[in-house]
Every structure is written in C-alpha cells, then in structure tokens.
Image: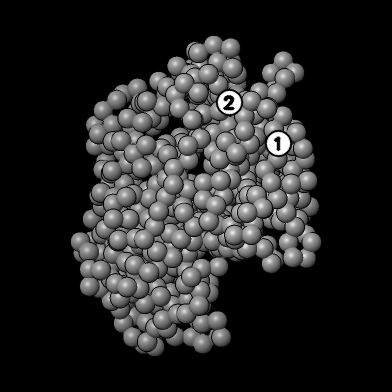
C-alpha cells in the first residue's frame, strides 16, 4: 500500500501540540512538513492504516507484482516550489505524446495524435480534418491558455488575489472573457469547427465535473482552468514510482522534520474556543483519547469538517467519474495502423469524447440514465515509468492501463450499484473495442486466482473507501483562484479562528497539488486564522 503503512507515532494521551492535522493525505503531509520545519510541534491523525489518502500506489491484483496509482494518477498542479522547499525525493517524467483520439471518417479508421513534435501534430490534424485550419486554431487557443497559465499558476501559493487583481495579472481581456466570464462552450465552438477536436478540448472542463459545455454556473470553466494552468504550462506528468512515491516522500519530509504521523486514528470531533482546541480520536482497537492544539488543520472535506465541529454542513457534493485500473499482457493493436499503440496509449487516449457525444452523455446522465455511449480516457503509466512493474512482468511486455470515465454521477449508482457499474464498464470497454483490432479482453492479464486484472471504482466506492463526499474527487465544486467570502487571506479559513481547511475543498484546492496544505501552513505561520483576515 504505502511505505508508511507499517508503523505509527501514537499521540501522547492528553498531550498538546502547536498543530494537529486531521487526515494524512498529501495536503495534510505538506502542511505537516512545512510546520514541523518551522519548529512547530505537529501531530497528524489518519483514519486509515497508511498515509497518502487518494494519492497512493497499490497492488490491487492478487499475486501480481504491479503497483498502480489506484485513485489519483497524474501530476500537474504540484508547484516545484513545494518540491524544492520540502526537499522531496520525488521525480516526474514528461509524456512525449499529449493525446491520441481514434475516429472513423468515411468508413476508414483514423485519429488525432497530439505530440511528437510540431510537424507531426500538424500532419495529424490535416489527416483527420483535411486542412490545417483546425491546427492553427489549436495553436492560437492554447497559446492563449498558456499565457494565462504563466500568470495565474504562481499565484496559487501566494495570498489570495481579489478578482480584479487577478484580472489585471492575466492582462488579457479576451482570455478573461473566455475562461472567467462565458461558458467555455462558447469559445470552443467559436474556435474549432471539427466535432472531434472540439471534444478533445472540452474534456479538460469535465474531469470529475458533471456539467455541460454551456452550464451557466461555469463549473466547467473552473475545472478547465485548473487543468490548463498546471506548472505554468498545463502539462500533465507521470510520477515515477506511482502516486505513492510522492506521498511517501512527503511523509518522509514531515517525519524527518519532527512531525508525528499516527495512522489508524480516526478523529471524532473538534472543540475550539478560537484560541485553543481539543481533538478527540478513536484508535482501530477502540481506545479513545484527546489531544490539545493551538491550531487544527483539517485535510478532509468541508462536509467532514462540519461534522467534526458541529457546524451546518455545506450543500451535498457529488462525484461523476468511473475509475478503472487494468493490467494487460500486451497493448492491443489499433484499427488505425498509422499509429503505434505504444504512442497512442502513452498520452491520453480519448474514447467517445466527440463534442456531440459528450453533450449526449451528459443529457442522458442528467435524466438519470447511464450514458449509452460513455466517454472516457485512458493512459498507460508503465510506458513512461516501467519501474511500477515487477521485473518478470516488464520483461514479458505487460502494461498497465488507467481509465477515467466521464458523466457518471453518483446518483446513477444509488439504486443498484453493482449492476449499473457493470453495465457502464461493459459499455465503456465496448467503445474502446470499436477502435481496436482485437478485443481488450484478449489482452487482459489474470491474477493468481485466474481472474481478469481489472477493477472499477464508482463515486460511491470512493465515498466508502476514501470518505470523499459523494465520491467527488475535488471534495466539492472547484472554486475560482481568487478571494472568496469568508475564506480569508489564504483561502483556508473557517468560522473557527484556529481551525483551518487544508484539503481539496479549500479555495484553490482540487487535484494533487499540495497547494491547500502549503497555504494552511502559511496561514498558521503568519498567525492568521480569523475569517476576516
């Protein structure tokens, strides 16, 4: 599971700490490392028997030596500043191919390959669409988002700007209108003519976000923004050793700085008078205890925070994704023979994500029906980082596949979870098979008991396994990266002056970034806690 599952640092019963952190996910570990390095006494209380939260590497298939990033799986939003300041022993590898989207045109298999150099990408656009118009539009559009990324990403680890301050920083009225004011569907339709190209662009607005391209709430815009600003470039990189390598490095950094990490400790309640707090917990063997804290940092959802403090809970959150992990004996051959499967699956492999297909899938799910043509995207971690496979598997050509399905809101699974999950999985794999020269089932490896190496996780599975509200991978709808009422100077404040939110539900939370953990630590070190600060 994690290198940090084997031992724990139990709290001193009735003891007191400068900071108690509720939850040992990556954001809690970032906060713990920063505060401990600053000389504060820090205790992390984690419910599970390991740290890492959703960012862990596991061996999900019995008797098979393959370590998969079981839940979160790519890194874009983690600032190099955090890696550098915490001295993390952690590496990322860039994917040379950005994406491949198979298609059929005039009865012939084809597709769009983005990556491998400018000329190759230009040629692929022309092969799909018959001209260079869409490629030139692509270049203009992503030059615009690139300029926004360069200007917005550095602000994520600074005190929150106001909306107008961020607008001045962006310094591009067209970009501001496209990303911050109008539904992203307007710009996609104005910029691109080809349905498949439009769909590839729109997918970044829908990862874990159940919305239409023209949703007036602009939830899709906020999702799109976070997906294109990562690292100041929008690139999504592969963590060497899987996501667990990052959280193991963070746990090492926190421990080496003096933080105590107590796994198997579930927090029951937080009582605060604004100046001091008491945190009650229960261990796996049923023992209960309390610790005192000057500050409590909650690396959990806003719903969990409200339950712990007795406050009114926020609106219920809902996740909308199907996560599928697979191990293959070999990569499947493609119907489009112009593309090597080792390139097609190295980037993001888009399935049934044409613009019209995405709209139809959303409409079906919004009406309470599983999409007949489920959209999804796949990538192969082991092509970029073969070290996640045991030597025997790598030598025999085994590969991992990670699939992320869109427009599968938690509500669809409420009545008959397993039946709907199996139906959606079958329909999703059928969409992939339509572009393969051989069935995916023929390529699946089997575990030690002869079962196919495939597992599917619904939003309700994530709610059960990871305490994600409604299975929402962002804890709630993503926020704009500027000042929000009541969020304070760093976007982490709550109505309790010395209780801070350092999880994905904080302003500028979501994704594997460490940003809320960094910002909550900065709020503590500045002595800022009041919502008005």
Q: Horizontal placement of 339 versus 372: left or right? A: left
Q: Is residue 224 visible?
A: yes
Q: Is residue 159 above or below residue 176?
A: below
Q: Residues within 10 Å of mark 1 (few under 14, many from 20)?
A: some
Residue 69: percent from left, percent from top = 55, 56
Q: Which residue is mark 2?
A: 112
Q: Is residue 312 visible?
A: no
Q: Which residue is mark 1?
A: 333
* Image quadrant where one finds the N terminus: bottom right
Between residue 129 and residue 474, name the one nearer to us.
Answer: 129
Determine whether the residue tagged by mark 1 lies in a helix, strand or loop.
Answer: loop
For marks 1 and 2, give the one nearer the viewer. 1
Determine whether the residue tagged by mark 2 lies in a helix, strand or loop.
Answer: strand
Residue 450: percent from left, percent from top = 79, 61
Give the residue at x 73% y 50%.
444
Give the residue at x 54% y 11%.
131
Q: Residues within 10 Å of mark 2 (few under 14, many from 20)?
A: many
Contact? badges 1 and 2 (CB < 8 Å)? no
- The image quadrant that residue 236 belongs to is top left
């Amino acid at each position: 599971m994690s290198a940090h599952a084997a031992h724990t640092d139990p709290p001193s019963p009735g003891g007191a700490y400068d900071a108690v952190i509720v939850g040992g996910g990556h954001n809690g570990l970032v906060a713990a490392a920063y505060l401990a390095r600053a000389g504060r006494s820090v205790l992390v209380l984690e419910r599970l028997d390991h740290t890492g939260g959703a960012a862990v590497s596991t061996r999900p298939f019995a008797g098979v030596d393959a370590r998969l990033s079981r839940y979160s799986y790519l890194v874009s939003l983690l600032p190099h500043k955090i890696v550098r300041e915490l001295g993390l022993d952690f590496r990322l590898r860039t994917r040379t191919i950005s994406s491949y989207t198979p298609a059929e045109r005039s009865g012939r298999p084809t597709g769009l390959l983005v990556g491998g150099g400018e000329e190759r990408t230009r040629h692929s656009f022309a092969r799909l669409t018959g001209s260079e118009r869409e490629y030139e539009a692509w270049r203009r559009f992503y030059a615009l988002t690139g300029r926004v990324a360069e200007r917005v990403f550095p602000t994520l680890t600074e005190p929150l700007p106001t909306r107008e301050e961020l607008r001045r920083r962006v310094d591009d009225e067209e970009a501001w209108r496209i990303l911050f004011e109008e539904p992203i569907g307007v710009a996609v339709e104005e910029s691109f003519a080809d349905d498949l190209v439009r769909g590839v662009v729109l997918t970044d607005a829908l990862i874990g976000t159940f919305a239409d391209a023209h949703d007036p709430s602009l939830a899709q815009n906020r999702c799109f923004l976070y997906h294109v600003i990562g690292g100041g470039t929008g690139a999504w990189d592969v963590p060497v050793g899987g996501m667990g390598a990052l959280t193991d490095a963070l746990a090492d950094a926190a421990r080496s700085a003096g933080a105590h990490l107590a796994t198997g400790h579930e927090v029951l309640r937080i009582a605060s008078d604004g100046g001091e707090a008491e945190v009650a917990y229960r261990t796996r063997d049923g023992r209960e205890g309390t610790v005192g804290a000057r500050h409590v940092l909650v690396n959990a959802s806003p719903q969990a925070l409200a339950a712990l403090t007795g406050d009114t809970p926020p609106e219920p959150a809902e996740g909308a994704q199907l996560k599928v992990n697979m191990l293959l004996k070999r990569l499947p051959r493609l119907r489009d023979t112009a593309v090597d499967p080792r390139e097609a699956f190295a980037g993001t492999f888009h399935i049934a994500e044409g613009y019209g297909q995405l709209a139809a899938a959303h409409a079906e799910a919004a009406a309470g029906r599983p999409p007949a043509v489920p959209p999804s995207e796949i990538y192969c971690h082991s092509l970029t980082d073969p070290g996640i496979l045991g030597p025997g598997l790598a030598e025999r050509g085994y590969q991992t596949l990670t699939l992320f399905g869109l427009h599968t809101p938690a509500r669809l699974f409420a009545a008959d979870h397993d039946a709907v999950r199996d139906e959606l999985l079958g329909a999703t794999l059928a969409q992939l098979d339509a572009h393969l020269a051989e069935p995916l089932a023929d390529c699946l490896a089997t575990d030690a008991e002869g079962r196919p190496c495939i597992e599917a996780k619904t939003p309700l599975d994530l709610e059960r396994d990871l305490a994600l509200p409604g299975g929402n991978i962002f804890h709630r709808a993503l926020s704009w990266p500027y000042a929000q009422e009541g969020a304070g100077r760093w976007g982490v404040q709550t109505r309790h002056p010395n209780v801070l939110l350092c999880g994905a539900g904080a302003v500028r939370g979501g994704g594997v970034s460490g940003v809320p953990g960094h910002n909550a630590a900065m709020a503590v070190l500045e002595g800022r806690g009041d919502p008005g600060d």
